[in-house]
Image (tube, grey):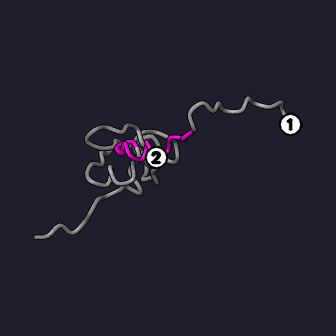
């Protein structure tokens, strides 16, 4: 049987402090070599309701951290021997 879904993300989870299902926010905790670790936070009380790890090819597609060429393109090229201009006084 072919896979019928890509990934699940929770929109509501039961909160033991609020004693009911609450909408949740997803907060990025860590970027790991094998994936990204997210935490679900209750929008009512701010308590942690769970975690999930996202892994796969979606991590490397938009991340400039994993692409050295993208970092090299962002470097500012200055001709040799030319120094940046000194900062001017404050404008008021």
Q: Position of residue 54 (x, y in %)?
A: 30, 48
Q: Is residue 45 left or right of residue 89?
A: left
- Is residue 84 within the magenta segment? no
Examine the rendering and report whether any part of residue 50 can be seen. Answer: no
Q: Dividing the picture into quarters, in which one does residue 57 lie? A: bottom left
Q: From the image, tell me which residue sits under label 2.
A: 73
User: What whole-number distance in Å separates the C-alpha atoms at marks 1 and 2?
Assistant: 32 Å
- Is residue 76 within the magenta segment? yes
Q: Is residue 70 left or right of residue 8?
A: right
Q: Provide the secondary structure element on which disc 1 rests.
A: loop
Q: Is residue 37 above or below residue 86?
A: below
Look at 40% across and 38% down and name the residue there: 29
What segment carries the magenta color?
Answer: 65-78
- Dot 1: few (<14), some (14–19), or many (≥20) neighbours within 10 Å? few
Which residue is at the far front?
81
Q: Dividing the picture into quarters, in which one does residue 52 lie? A: top left
Examine the rendering and report whether any part of residue 26 can be seen. Answer: yes
Report the quarter where the N terminus lies.
bottom left
Q: Position of residue 44 (x, y in %)?
A: 52, 46
Q: Provide the secondary structure element on which disc 2 rests.
A: helix
Which residue is at the far right?
92
Residue 91: assigned label: 1
Look at 27% across and 48% down and name the residue there: 55
Q: Position of residue 87 (x, y in %)?
A: 75, 30
Look at 51% across and 42% down and name the residue there: 45
Q: Nearer the viewer, mark 1 or mark 2?
A: 2
Report the quarter where the C terminus lies.
top right
Q: Position of residue 41 (x, y in %)?
A: 45, 44
Look at 25% across and 66% down and name the residue there: 5
Instruction: Compare residues 20 and 38 and report the one nearer the observer.
Output: 38
């Amino acid at each position: 049987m072919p896979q019928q879904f890509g990934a699940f993300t929770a929109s509501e989870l039961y909160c033991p402090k609020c004693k009911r299902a609450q909408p949740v926010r997803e907060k990025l905790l860590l970027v790991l070599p094998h994936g990204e670790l997210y935490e679900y936070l209750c929008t009512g009380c701010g308590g942690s309701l769970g975690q999930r790890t996202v892994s796969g090819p979606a991590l490397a597609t938009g991340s400039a951290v994993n692409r050295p060429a993208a970092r090299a393109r962002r470097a500012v090229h200055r001709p040799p021997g030319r120094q940046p201009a000194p900062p001017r006084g404050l404008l008021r």
